[in-house]
Amino acid sequence: MQGSTGKGPPEILLARTDLPAKDRTLWMARADEFAAVGHRVLACVRWPLEATWAGGEPDQRGQFMGLMACEDPLRDGVTEALGLCRDAGIRVIMVTGDFSIEDWLLIALIGSLLTALVVFGFDRSLEPNGDVPHARSMALVALTCASAALTAVLSRLKTLSEWIMTLGTLGLSALLVQVPFLAGWLHISPLHWDDWGIA
């Protein structure tokens, strides 16, 4: 039987192999271990091609061949270059990572819920007496909750700093909304128990 071999993100390819669920979980944990120490991790899969294969990209019944972890150490001079940027007031941010289909679906769902929450919050706050500061508070809470949820989804809260970032976002929002002095500075008004769905 003919076959084709490919590589790609483990979180996507492992789900398309014939591995039992228990083994997929085990190998995904191994991939996470490599990724946690700075390796670029790829899954290698062999795709059997039946005689009836029509030429499309194979994506089912893949035979898992193993993981490939690539290391990309810092080049000479990188540390010094980053130091020069920092001294010049430049904040350097590295954005990297692959997200699974499930991650993107969750992001889309959170975005849709955010839109609904903002619209609902404004409508509910403005309906009785056109209280714009109150409506702003509802929108701020909705946006903050969505931001924290996105942080949790994308980071999976694996480190202490990610927990601090998520909980800190929620805590800061509560302070800005509920402390009268801070709320007045932002031209918003504190929320009430029924706004939080408690009363």
Image (spheres, grey):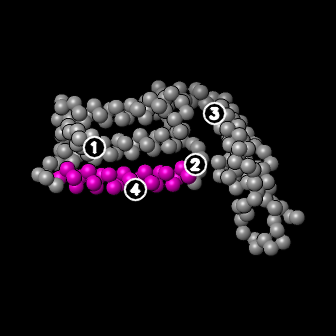
Q: Amino acid at mark 4?
A: Ser
Which residue corresponds to the image point at 22% horizontal and 55% vertical from the top-left? 123
* Magenta stretch in the rendered image: 102-126
4 and 1 marks in contact (CB < 8 Å): no
Q: CA distance from mark 2 to mark 3?
A: 15 Å
Query: Label 2, label 1: how many angstroms apart (C-alpha)?
Result: 33 Å
Q: Secondary structure at mark 3?
A: helix
The spot of residue 161 in percent (x, y) is: 49, 29
In which quadrant of the rendered image does the N terminus lie? bottom right
Q: Earlier in the sequence, mark 4 or mark 2?
A: 2
Q: Say above or below: 135 vs 176.
A: below
The residue under the point 33% across, 55% down is 116
Residue indicated by mark 3 = 36
Which of the 4 image quadrants contains residue 167? top left
Q: Quadrant of the C terminus?
A: top left
Work out whether residue 6 or residue 63 is closer to the camera in this orientation and state it. 63
Q: Residue at x 75, y 59 (%)?
A: 61
The residue singled out by tag 4 in the image is 112
Q: Mark 4 vs mark 1: which is more N-terminal?
A: 4
Query: Which label was assigned to residue 197?
Result: 1
Mark number, residue 99: 2
The nearer-to-camera label among 2 and 1 is 1
Q: Point out the tag, 1 or 3, that comes first from the N-terminus.
A: 3
Secondary structure under the numbered disc 1 in the rendered image: loop
Residue at x 37%, y 42% (from the top left corner): 145
Of pointers 2 and 1, the one earlier in the residue sequence = 2
Question: Three-letter amino acid code at disc 2?
Answer: Phe
